[in-house]
Amino acid sequence: MLERFHVPSEIAIRVQPDVMRQTVEDIFRGLGMPDEHAKQSTDVLLYADVRGIESHGVSNMLRVYVQSIRDGRINLNPKWRITHDAPAICTIDSDGAHGGVIGPEAMRIAIDRARQFGIGAVAVANGGHFGAAAYHAAMALEHDMIGVAMTAGGVGVLPTGGAERLIGLNPIAVAIPTQREPPFIFDASMSSVAGNKVRLLQRLGAPTAPGWIADADGTPIMEEREIPEGFMILPLGGTREIGSHKGYGLGVIVEVLTTVLAGTGAGPDRRAGQAHHFIAYDVKQFTDLDVFKDDTDTYMRRLRESKPAPGEERVWYAGLPEHEEEAERRERGIPYHPEVIGWFKATLAELGLPDRLPS
């Protein structure tokens, strides 16, 4: 996460991960979610928080999930089913399940099929927000597999040169196992900035960066300024001159591999909630596993130890900063904005649940 998204240390309230985990589980159960679903959904959220991915942790997403449960948009007792089936692949209708429940289940199926056939792929229709895509991709790592997860999220992104929201944020995550180095875990939306991060900026009173969003008429904002009303999100790259056609094209690809492949339309014409796609590659069925992991280690180490540009302290690769952040947060606690803690305390009181959080 860029520094502009972090809660300032002087106001941050630190909470130990186990305390926050119990608190979130209590809230889910208090709203009627079955125990195992509450634990799984919480695990997805805490994965984001301990790794410094605030945009997809409890600060932003839990209150969305709570409201969606209350509004009946999340089915707490889904009867999900496989609608199309073949040896290495399948499509699931999740029956409106919470994405933090059906996403991990679908990834487990992809992993099981990859174990049998070398590759497994699962499309999911009729679902909801599934949290950080990295969580699902990273599930493959403990099986010595490469994991891929993507989702069609929202419809808030402009096409290059356009002034109408037609594309989802549509993140792609890829997790690659290593031997000794921290694993490579890439997770990014195909927009210039995730919608949740814009909400973080608004909470922190921080400006937008150039090339992230457009004014209400579609004009790209190319300087730091206050986030305007009616803003729209630009594709990855911001403008055509600096590569927005690439983010635009990738966003459309994710849309097709999720919503269209699951048979539920695309963009503003989606017919059944959000859709996801999960893939697992069993490395040892492609090549020698130890050679693969050693070669990946060598490459990650070469990236990590490479010469930094002037003004830069070091070179990172995807997953490395989160790995280091996780170690620090597990020791010192997760830093939350006071407004977030205030929301938690009000919600716990409303549900008659115990409050274990610091003030």
Image (spheres, rainbow, N blue to C red):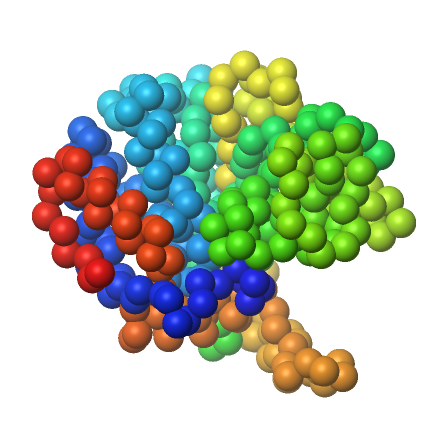
Count the marks: 0
Quadrant into which the C terminus falls:
bottom left
Q: Is residue 191 above or below residue 285?
A: above
Camera-side residue of 85 and 72: 72
Q: Is residue 26 above or below residue 153?
A: below
Q: In the picture provided, is 301 more to the left or to the right than 134? A: right
Camera-side residue of 39 and 220: 220
Residue 247 appears in the rendering: no
Q: Is residue 314 above or below residue 129?
A: below
Q: Position of residue 173 (x, y in %)?
A: 56, 49
Camera-side residue of 114 and 220: 220
Q: Quadrant of residue 337?
A: bottom left
Q: Position of residue 100 (x, y in %)?
A: 36, 39
Q: Quadrant of residue 186?
A: bottom right
Q: In the picture provided, is 236 more to the left or to the right than 295? A: right
Quadrant into which the N terminus falls:
bottom right
Q: Quadrant of residue 287?
A: bottom right
Look at 61% across and 69% down and name the residue there: 317
Look at 35% across and 51% down and name the residue there: 339
Look at 51% across and 45% down and name the residue there: 199
Residue 53 appears in the rendering: yes
Look at 65% across and 77% down and name the residue there: 315
Q: Position of residue 330 (x, y in %)?
A: 31, 70
Q: In the picture provided, is 176 more to the left or to the right than 50? A: right
Q: Is residue 355 above or below residue 65?
A: below
